[in-house]
Amino acid sequence: MLIRGDFIKLLFCYVEKYGIIKYTKVEVIMDLIRLKNVEKKYKNGVTAIYDLNLAIEKGSFTFVIGGSGSGKSTLIKMLYREEKPTKGQIIVGGLDVAKLRNSKVYKLRRKLGIVFQDYRLLPKLTVYENVAFAMEVIGATKEATRKNVLRALEEVGLKNKVHNYPDQLSGGEQQRVAIARAIVNNPKLLLCDEPTGNLDPERSMEIMKVLEDINKTRGTTIIMATHDKEIVNRMKKQVVTLKDGHLVNFKKKGTYVDENI
Amino acid sequence: MKIFRMLGRSIRDAFKSVIRNFSLSLASISCITITLIIVAIAIMASFNVQNFTKEIEKDLTIVVFMDNDATEEDINQMKQLLDTKKNIAKYTFESKNAVRKDMMEENDVFNSVMKDWENDENPLRDTFKIKVNNVDNMGKTADALKKMEKVDTVQYGEGMVERLVNAFSSIEKVAYGVVIALVIVTIFLIINTIKLTIFSRKREIGIMRLVGASNFAIKVPFIIEGMILGFFGAIIPVVLITYGYLAFYNHFEGHLFTQLIELIQPEPFIYQASLIVIIIGIIVGMIGSAGAVRKYLKV
């Protein structure tokens, strides 16, 4: 029931040249992310996630909600391989994340962008340089960097602040720089770990508008962990609800339901 | 193309980091300088000892005197035996007649006494002069030769040779030990200094990992930084050994204490030694920084 869009096609291919009929089994994966029986137990004995099964489609916008200690941060961390699951399988964009070696993590990270609550910008670099940094370190050319950076900054509405330093910007603006950095390499997936946690409701809604635009115009799949009731109820997006490490709800157009938390 | 772009960026970052953390860089450079000076001295000493040992070994000879009544057949048999021995590099044979002629040429008194000796009444001995391959086993070879038929006495400067060879090989071993120990200490010092410079860039490394820089791309600037520090650390030792050795060589006029101990000619030697010191400095800096950055590349 949970794993949708996952089906097997049998293709009949008649190969005229050799006059034989070939049956090819083709598995068509529509999901960007699939988790199978994932369990995460930390070294101190705390189990953060119990037996989680989840599939998230390409191009969707998903909230991960739950109280403190519900495992939503752990789930996000496992998706970008900051943490490894103790059991089970995680597939992100065709990569088996659980089996990914430390030295190959960069292959996964190039497929996704990550936004944090604390922005994580480099204070000595300007807005432009901060965003360009993400392209420079993977060896992009200057022209490509310039083009992509300006486009990303335009999308988040900061084109007029390219030469400012992070400490000259408001919290909401800094977070938008972080979002620009996350999308500058055209990732398929954007992970957000409480991106509005430090912002007032008004700024939060600005951020949400930016994220929604990215989801629509770029087709980027977005997964966002949050405990902001207001946002979840307003956006009417897919919602994954976690409680004490268990998946309690997965709704297409979900809202924040108190009794589940 | 991509690799050159990344390399250019790495070199730029490395130089930036050296300048930005100038006091720390200076600290590691002086650490490397001090150790490399000692390493350089140890290298020059061990090379000289090696050279001297080789020179002495070249001069070492086993002299075998045959019995007085040894016939030509005995001599030929001996020659065949010597050909089969592994440790014998080459030998020269002098018949007792040849020895007699040599001695007559050398001295007038000998000349008058030996003039009338016929072959049968010549009391001198047929002589083999033997060079060996391995001086350490010279004693054994001499003993083996002594046991052969018709051999009267074997001389090779027993005792003296062995003590000399032993002394030199232990000096050499100590010098190598000092060099290795110093290199290890320097590596640890560099690991610690570069760890400090990396600590200030911890955040940057974290973000680099998040946005998909490969471990290799993150490591390279730090490794280059270590190489730069190693290279700068090697400059003073190189200058010191170049001029120091020249002055030393000229002061002793090529010989240390006695005419016996000959120093290596400075001309190509100082350049070789400088090259070795620079390479050690660069490698040590590289290993040190690679070790320091490793910790930050785990998830």
Image: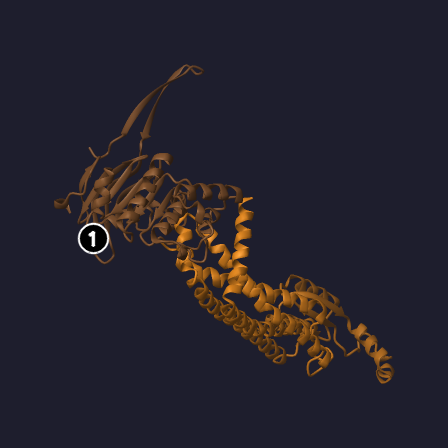
Chain colours: A brown, B orange
Query: Residue tagged by mark 1?
Result: A68
Q: Is residue B135 visible?
A: no
Type of amino acid at the residue the image marks with label 1: Ser
- Above or below, B89 against B4 in this view is below
- Screen quadrant of the N terminus of chain B: top right
- The chain carrying label 1 is A
Q: Is residue A166 visible?
A: yes
- Above or below, A7 against A124 in this view is above
- Screen quadrant of the C terminus of chain B: bottom left
Where residue A107 appears, as percent x and y from the top left, is 41, 44
Q: Which residue is painted at 21% across and 45% down in the image? A: A230
Residue, far bottom: B109
Q: For numbered disc 1, what is the local secondary structure?
A: loop
Question: Closest to the observer: A153 or B276?
Answer: A153
Residue, far left: A259
Where residue B207 appears, as percent x and y from the top left, is 40, 53
Question: Closest to the observer: B147 or B69?
Answer: B147
Write down the quadrant of residue B278 in the picture.
bottom right
Where residue B140 appears, as percent x and y from the top left, is 59, 72
Q: Which residue is painted at 38% across and 36% down in the image? A: A218
Give the number of callouts. 1
Question: Closest to the observer: A165 or A134?
Answer: A165
Compared across the picture, whether B116 is left or right of A49 comes to: right
Please rate how many residues cluster around mark 1, counting C-alpha atoms within 10 Å: few if below 14, some from 14 to 19, many from 20: few
- Above or below, B182 against B298 in this view is below
Where residue B175 appears, as percent x and y from the top left, is 56, 74
